[in-house]
Image (cartoon, helix red, strand yellow):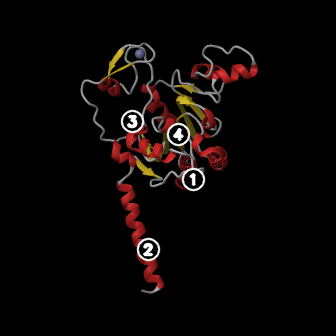
């Protein structure tokens, strides 16, 4: 076979692989998840017992006290986007072990199995009440939503893809911060994602950051804080270092509501606190209001 023939064959193979990857999209794999009957859980705030199925139907908000439970990425996408509008992008990335940390590969494999996700972040195209956008969601059930090389790459790609599509970006953050097992490679993602946001912002597009419980560490210190509009869910923990570390450093007692979204709203860090039941409408309004003419 000549060289051109070889290239064509290679391309065909690549196309097949891409198709395969799309069929294996983590979003498709987990959206038909069934909750076993008779399952109950305890609300961490009011400590009452809640039926899991009812809790899911109530968008993971406690019906007694309004506590906002953590949500898996797929559930976020399901409740915030119009039905069947989500097209996942950035599929098929493999998390490596650049620093040869013992047990890291096994850990990743276990989380993949438990969550049915490839990594702690999912992004793609979607519509909210007909308003198109590029949407990214972190999943705190995958290694505490920590940001390693793959998460950083996919977050940066979210903005690149939005530039290509000339669309606004919405990112839901939920993270324990940088991924310890990837050391310096993880920290580099802070610069990388921030640079991607800057490039996108310089072109005049809209970026809405939605901070959910918990958003901490390197994610707060990079793309989570760089939104043109920063929304937060009620009572969410948002911060960089933990309160104990700060108290020891500055040798002062911190206020009780320190690092909660309500406190950050008072200080001007957060623009608006939105109850989960109003979130979809609020996002649609913001997208509509900032829609570009060209
Ligand atoms: Zn409750």
Q: Residue 151, image x and y in percent?
A: 54, 46
Q: Which residue is mark 2?
A: 10
Q: Which residue is mark 1?
A: 160
**Label 2 crowd (10 A; few <14 / some 14-19 / many >=20):** few
Kindly report the distance in space between the C-alpha atoms of the residues bearing marks 2 and 1.
Answer: 26 Å
Task: State left or right for residue 37 relative to residue 88.
Answer: left
Task: State left or right for residue 19 relative to residue 143.
Answer: left
Q: Residue at x 63, y 25 (%)?
A: 242
Name which quarter of the figure residue 55 lies in.
Answer: top left
Kindly report the distance in space between the C-alpha atoms of the residues bearing marks 4 and 3.
Answer: 14 Å
Looking at the image, residue 90 lies above or below residue 48: below
Judge by depth and name the residue closer to the eye, 102 or 159. Answer: 102
Kindly report the distance in space between the C-alpha atoms of the residues bearing marks 2 and 3.
Answer: 37 Å
Judge by depth and name the residue closer to the eye, 87 or 222. Answer: 222
Q: Residue at x 42, y 26 (%)?
A: 277
**Sequence-first disc among 3 and 1:** 3
Q: Which mark is residue 171?
A: 4
Name which quarter of the figure residue 276 lies in.
Answer: top left
Badge nearest the viewer, 4 or 2:
2
Q: Residue 194, image x and y in percent?
A: 65, 44
Q: Which mark is residue 75?
A: 3
Kindly report the distance in space between the C-alpha atoms of the residues bearing marks 4 and 2.
Answer: 36 Å
Ligand 1's quadrant is: top left
**Sequence-first disc among 4 and 3:** 3
**Sequence-first disc among 1 and 4:** 1
Where's the N terminus, which quadrant?
Answer: bottom left
Check if mark 2's residue and mark 1's residue have beta carbons within 8 Å: no
Q: Residue 64, image x and y in percent?
A: 38, 14
Q: Is residue 234 visible?
A: yes
Judge by depth and name the residue closer to the eye, 113 or 169. Answer: 113
**Sequence-first disc among 4 and 2:** 2
Q: Residue 147, image x and y in percent?
A: 56, 42
């Amino acid at each position: 076979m000549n060289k051109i023939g070889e290239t064509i064959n290679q391309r065909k193979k690549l196309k097949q692989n891409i198709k395969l990857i799309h069929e294996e999209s983590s979003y498709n794999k987990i959206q038909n998840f069934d909750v076993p009957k008779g399952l109950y859980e305890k609300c961490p705030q009011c400590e009452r017992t809640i039926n899991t199925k009812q809790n899911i139907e109530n968008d993971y908000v406690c019906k007694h006290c309004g506590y906002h439970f953590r949500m898996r990425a797929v559930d976020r996408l399901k409740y915030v986007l119009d039905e069947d509008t989500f097209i996942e992008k950035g599929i098929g990335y493999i998390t490596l072990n650049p620093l040869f940390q013992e047990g890291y590969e096994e850990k990743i494999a276990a989380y993949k199995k438990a969550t049915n996700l490839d990594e702690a972040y999912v992004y793609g195209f979607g519509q909210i009440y007909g308003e198109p956008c590029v949407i990214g969601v972190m999943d705190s059930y995958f290694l505490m939503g920590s940001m390693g090389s793959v998460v950083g790459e996919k977050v940066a790609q979210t903005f690149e893809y939005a530039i290509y599509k000339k669309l606004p970006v919405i990112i839901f953050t939920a993270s324990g911060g940088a991924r310890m097992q990837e050391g310096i490679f993880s920290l580099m993602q802070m610069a990388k994602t921030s640079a991607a946001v800057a490039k996108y912002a310089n072109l005049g597009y809209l970026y809405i950051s939605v901070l959910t419980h918990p958003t901490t560490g390197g994610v707060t210190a990079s793309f989570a804080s760089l939104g043109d509009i920063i929304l937060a869910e009620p009572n969410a923990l948002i911060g960089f270092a933990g309160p104990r570390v700060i108290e020891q450093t500055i040798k002062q007692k911190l206020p009780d509501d320190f690092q909660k979204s309500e406190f950050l709203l008072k200080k001007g860090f957060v623009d608006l606190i939105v109850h989960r039941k109003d979130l979809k409408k609020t996002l649609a309004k913001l997208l509509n209001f900032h829609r570009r003419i060209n």
